[in-house]
Amino acid sequence: MPYRGECFPARDIVAGANCQAFAYALLRHFGRAISDFRSSDLWDDVRETERVRDLEPLDLLLFNRTADPYGAHVGVWLGEGRVIHLAKRVGLPAVWPLERFAREPGYEVVIGAKRVRPCAAPGSS
């Protein structure tokens, strides 16, 4: 699955995706329901997700050049210090050690982590 730009339809990842669409598709594959949030909306969400400090596999991580979640890059924590993500500069899904993000332009700040709530239903109130 190649990288596609920000406006690419989030649920259609067969022909390509962006980092958010890839991360959400991966979570859905493992039974974690989540809406197609933009990164800043994901960071602000409290209905479907919660902010966490102690990481567990399938938690979402947000990265940016500053602490601003708008336009942030989204990856999925795999455990053992590894994050899977889809980056335009790589072109395909990649697994990086968490420390590598600090050395990559645009990813140097870890904004934080979000965990999908177990009983969340996308778009529910």
Image (cartoon, grey):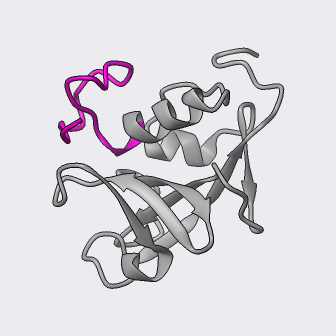
Residue drawn at 64 percent across, 16 percent down = 123
Q: Classify 47 as above or below 50.
A: above
Relative to 92, is 101 on the left or the right? Answer: right
Magenta segment's dominant SS is loop
Residue situated in front as seen by the camera: 29 or 33: 29
Q: Classify 90 as above or below 38.
A: below
Query: In the image, residue 17 lies at what x, y percent?
Result: 27, 34
Residue 47: name its quadrant: top right
Relative to 78, is 46 on the left or the right? Answer: right
Query: In which quadrant is the N terminus drawn?
Result: top left
Can residue 72 be seen here?
A: no
Magenta segment includes 12: yes
Query: In the image, residue 26 lies at what x, y percent?
Result: 50, 36
Query: In the image, residue 122 lies at what x, y percent?
Result: 64, 19
Magenta segment includes 37: no
Residue drawn at 57 percent across, 27 percent down = 28
Q: Classify 57 as above or below 123.
A: below
Residue situated in front as seen by the camera: 96 or 36: 96
View extreme (right): residue: 119
Can residue 54 be seen here?
A: yes
Residue 33: name its quadrant: top right
Residue drawn at 76 percent across, 16 percent down = 125
Magenta residues span: 1-20
Query: In the image, residue 14 lies at what x, y percent?
Result: 27, 23
Relative to 41, is 31 on the left or the right? Answer: right
Residue drawn at 52 percent across, 39 percent down = 41
